[in-house]
Amino acid sequence: AALAAAESCRRRSLPCRAVAAKVAGKGCGRRSASKTYMISPLVLAASASGVLIFAQRPLSVLSFTGPDRHRFLHGLCTADVNALRGAGVAESAVVDAAGNTQDLLTVLDGGGDELLALGEPGRGSELHAFFDRYLFPADAVSVAEASGEYSCYEVVGEAAGSLLADALGSELPHPLPANGEVRRLDGSAAWLLGSGALAAAAPAAAQEGERSFSVLLQDEPRLAGSLAAAARHLDASTPPWEALRVRRGLPRRGAEFAAAGAALKVPPLWLGRWEAVAVDKGCYLGNEVLVRLSRAKRQRLELYGVALSCAPAEVPAAGAEVRLTTTAEAGAEAGAEAAAEAGAEA
């Protein structure tokens, strides 16, 4: 979805072919009045052992160490990082003073003496520079880029637990972590995140029983190989990360926000990342704007996922503009077209 295009379409009527679609959105029950969006088509196969998707997630990693690590990160992102003390995972965003999204992060406290912030690939240097800019000599915290040390794998679907059991064996923690929980694997530099970065973006899938896990590895080629082998053994569909993140509704910098040359500024709430914003945690960069937006009766724009019910040949090309209609509207248009055709034949 492209929010800039959605905003431009709000202001003028576009001659678009109506497409019957099911729309999924979230955010306090309030939705944008706009019905015109950009879509990115996606088709995924199911595995022979049930619905299962396995993909390597490219990422940047920042490491925060020192006694002040929770307080420091808490004041510079939208998540309640102080609530993670001990072990936990939270979605978050880095915003500017106007509340506009600069980066989306997964913040991980593995229960040790380090916090990790997982961001988009290629953003490690920029994120490190951002946090370093706010470091003061009195802060007992160190920030380091550690992207080269980590790899991350996403396992999504009904058979996710079976794949993890085959790949990790006795090292697999029991019980498996629930959403928002993290457990370290025995005897290795590896963490299993319950639902990882993807669950909150697709609550409907989680309610239908689809499980999702992130496996974060620090210099663990043996475990990485075991995961890949288990995925092949289960005949899993293996889409690239881009396909998986579109399916799960995870916004990407340069696509759904912070696109080059885009005039539209996008707060995380407009991206549907309500779970990433703690509006009651106190002062942080961009806090006042996001609190005000969270109390608004409606959001000016929101990001939607579009599931098309049409033949593959009829799927619009990526970037095509489509107009979403209700079932009643689509039926009325079909009836009008049939009547016009009948009149022409007469």
Image: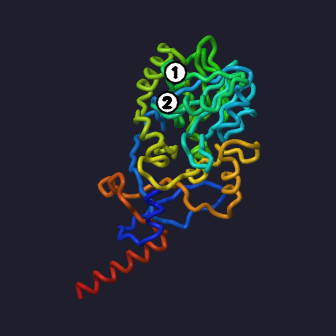
**Looking at numbered disc 2 in the image, what kind of residue is underneath it?**
Leu
Q: Does the CB distance between marks 1 and 2 fall below 8 Å?
A: yes
Q: Quadrant of residue 314?
A: bottom left
Foreground pick, 176 / 114: 114
Q: Is residue 250 above or below residue 237?
A: below
Residue 27, x across and y down, in percent:
63, 55
Query: What is the image's colouring?
Result: rainbow
Residue 80, x across and y down, in percent:
72, 38
Residue at 46%, 61% in the rendered image? 6
Task: Give the Cα separation between the discs numbered 1 and 2.
Answer: 8 Å
Instruction: In the rendered structure, find residue 150 and report the number of the disc placed on it.
Output: 1
Q: What residue would you read off at disc 2? A: 59
In the drawing, does residue 59 fall left or right of residue 267?
A: left
Foreground pick, 165 / 293: 293
Residue 308, x across and y down, in percent:
42, 56
- Give neighbour class at mark 2: few <14, some 14-19, many 20+ (Cα, 10 Å): some
Question: From this viewpoint, which residue is outermost toward the top?
Answer: 187
Q: Is residue 74 above or below residue 115?
A: below
Q: Is residue 6 above or below residue 285?
A: below
